[in-house]
Image (cartoon, coloured by chain):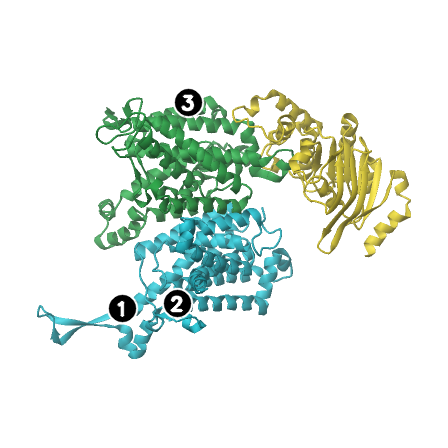
Chain colours: A yellow, B cyan, C green
Amino acid sequence: MGILEVQNVNKRFGGLQALNNVNLSVREGSVHAIIGPNGAGKSTLLNCFVGRLMPDTGSVMFNGQSLLGLKPHQINQAGVSRVFQTPEIFADLSLWENVMIASFARRDGAYRLNAFGRVKADGEIRDHAERNLSDVGLASKRNMIASALSRGDKRRLELAMCLAQDPKLLLLDEPTAGMSRADTNNTIDLLKRIGESRGITKVVIEHDMHVVFSLADRITVMAQGTPIVEDAPENIKGNPKVQEAYLGGAHA
Amino acid sequence: MDAILLQILNGLDKGSAYALIALGLTLIFGTLGVVNFAHGALFMIGAFCAVTMQKLLSLEKVALSETEKTPWGTPAEIRTPYITDWFGDFGTVLLEYSVLVSILLAVPLMMIVGVVMERGLIKHFYKRPHAEQILVTFGLAIVLQEIIKSWFGANPIPQPAPDALRGMMDFGAWMGFQAGTIVYPLWRFVYFLFAAGIIGAVFCFLQFTTFGMVVRAGMADRETVGLLGIDIDKRFTFMFGLAAVVAGLAGVMFTPIVSPDYHMGMDFLVLSFVVVVVGGMGSLPGAVAAGFLLGILQSFASMNEVKQIFPGIDQIIIYLVAIAVILLRPRGLMGRKGVMET
Amino acid sequence: MLEKLRNNDTAIMLAFTAMVLLGPIILAPFGAGYPDLLQRFAIFGIFAVGFNILFGLTGYLSFGHAAFLGIGSYMAVWSFKLLSMSVIPAIILAVLLSGLFALVIGYVSLRRSGIYFSILTLAFAQMCYNLAYSVLTPITNGETGLKVLSSDPRILDGASEGLPLPSVLGLRMIDTWRGSFLGMDVQFNVGFYFCAVILIIAFYISLRIFRSPFGLMLRAIRTNQARLNYTGINTRPYALTAFVISGMYAGLAGGLMACTDPLAGAERMQWTASGEVVLMTILGGVGTLIGPVLGAGFIKYFENIFSKINDNVLSGFLDFLPETLREGVVWVMGAFVGEGWHLTLGLLFMIIVIFLPGGLVEGFNRIIAWFSRPKGGDKATARVPAE
């Protein structure tokens, strides 16, 4: 029994069967990569996990609790955080404030009216946010306004926000898309380091095979809305079905 | 039955005005993505085109009579409008039908107003947040209505309908009911026909011309059409002008029904926005259908029988419907799924 | 130096308190030192400060806040009629009732965002306005407006002799001491000081909200509501709390209007009144602490000046011009003053939105940045951080 259990999930958009009977089991503590050609349904699947989309049928269980029908904030409070394909951050706020919001969400829950406390006087939150900013190497920029960051730094900031929540499951949607080789390697190191020190289960969607094979200890290959192969990384490379999916996808 | 029919008829004229204003609002929102709070002011300017035309046509030449004397012994004044002086009987006819003549003035004038507004102001707000679009057009609406107020004064200025179209028509007899049960002012019926004609023309224009096709494509996906090498901006400017003309004509023809004053635009704007929301943001048929629907609903709500059960319902029915629609079906009656649903 | 002051809350509060309390003296040279206008400054300051908590922090643009102003006024007058001429119960009840209305209206309206939210709030406010004019006439007294009568029951202090006046702790709101300061006529009015104390408290609460975790969440809603949801925050109750707080501020302002002049009319609820508070907030500076107070003061001051000027006054000013030219200039300028004040207001609205969306506060910041820029220094160091 994995920490995330997906059973028989279907999702249809008009005439397009975006997800076709998806079954997936993610083991606790693992890094599970989902790969596949464009339009294979990877992002759609992720959207079903965080409450952005509602599958037509099937079940998504996290830690024995169904995620379907929950609001995004409820899913997050249950322990699922997500890094988006294009960084979603609070662009008008400082880096520090960005991460502090996540720290508040972790400590105070989905809603707590604290209209007379002072953000700056809350040592616990400050330290916690500071620690997470350092973890991604942004501590020196903490007073900058987030919109001024480079794209790679924005991604790291988003990661720091997700980490500040101490999630049980971290969903990463193409965490290195659009990054330079050096930045990509940094990110891989960062994710590995955090994976080892905190033991967070991760689900990664990625195109870059270099990233996938550096990080993952389990890989699912999707094509046309269905997982076709699930195996350890070393067995994936030579699998004929995978080659066919990528080549077939290219021809179709 | 005849009572129901009468209420439907009573709702048609207001419904027509809502539909025409909402049509323009939707065109602008759909093509340019701009929320135009000054659209009611365009309706009001149209109405004042009619006022201006009426004033121009009835400018009078004053001559002193040689034979007739006033009771004070001075020569009596003879006032003849210049227009009759110049054109004789035809001039009298022109004066009589000044509301219709003002259409000739309103079409080019409203087109110019619309194009100037779009090029001069709205264009700079395409990329700015909706809140700022609302605020700047709100400011513009205040400016336009205050200009009209300082020019024409604050009091309503009655506009007569042409004599031939002024009476009542006996709908009952016409429809085969008992005569005299459903009488309806003739001009309101003219207004409805006129509105229907305009709406039909706009739809035909969008449906059957290349220009309209491009605009519809632009409403669906602006960027792609831009990539095709079509100069979409010019067409959208024209669309803004067209929306202004539609609103202006709605205003011109409305003057014999309700005497125009400077804040009529604001009154209609709030309701027309509600109409757009009920019909579905970005849906032209939705705007028209919701306009008529809400006009008729309002007319039913002002029946005495209804008011006795729900006092004041006629004042708030439109808002209640809007609130219900936004909460239960946010995309509106005919809106596309996913367009501004939240 | 200025930076430090800007972030020192005690200094901000002290400066603000001093400015407000010395208002009658500071504003006397500008011809604005008389009670009626000073009261309006304070009352609309409260209204705008409250509106800013919603619009400035969360970005939700309400076009219906005048409804709460009207509700507060009606409630306060009813308190004068039924309970007592003391202003304390009147404003407490005004705040509570408008808060209740804000809870209901906000609960429904906040299910949508963007322009839908604006139109929903507008629809609710128009409903309140229309109802106040029609079926609710027994409560609102329709077009005549609700007035205090000497025959009203007033169960706490009984029917009094003569026309009763609102009072606090035995002082009537209209009591005024006149003094002289540097040769100027200075008026200290009970009503103004009552409103001023409340304005200071209201400003302090707003300051604390700005600095609090709650305020941080509200700013996050404005920036990226979706991210906030995916960060485990339930945004709706936060926005609703902000809506209710700003509705209560509006009700407080409405109650104070009734305290200084005990009558209430439906025109206070009209949507142009809602537009006015939006203008005050953006004119001063959306999302800044002091901006809304500045904006409210600015608009009420110029409204007062402009609407008093008429063609005769203008001709007096332009005495030096030749006759014909003078008539022309008076004619043009006459359109903007007196009755034409709203035209000026509309133009101002457009100019601010087009050229200075950050309002007066941003304008000051730019000027300060321009002066404090080191000679030959690079532009980056002269950047002024957002308040």
Q: Is residue A198 left or right of residue B21?
A: right
Whether tag 3 and tag 1 are in contact, CB under 8 A, the answer is: no
Q: Of helix, strand and loop, which one carries label 1?
A: loop
Q: Which residue is mark 1?
A: B59
Residue type pointed to by label 2: Thr
Residue B24: tell me if it is visible.
no
Marks 1 and 2, Cα distance to the nearest angstrom?
A: 41 Å
Q: Which residue is mark 2?
A: B181
Kindly identify which chain the residue marked by label 3 belongs to: C
Residue C197: tell me if it is visible.
yes
Pointer 1 or 2: first along the chain = 1
Q: Which residue is mark 3?
A: C14
Q: Nearer the viewer, mark 1 or mark 2?
A: 2
The correct choice, above or below, for B229 with respect to B65 in the image is above
Q: Is residue B312 left or right of residue A17?
A: left
Which residue appears at 43% of the width and 44% of the height?
C125
Q: Is residue A179 left or right of residue B1?
A: right
Residue C374 lies, in percent from the top left, at 50, 32
* Residue situated furthest left in the rendering: B73
In depth, the one of A224 and A144 nearer the eye is A224
Using the rendered image, report if marks 1 and 2 lie on a common chain.
yes
Give the image quarter of residue B167.
bottom left
Give the image quarter of residue A35.
top right
Kindly identify which chain the residue marked by label 2 belongs to: B
Residue A148 lies, in percent from the top left, at 61, 37
Q: Nearer the viewer, mark 3 or mark 1?
A: 1
Residue type pointed to by label 3: Leu
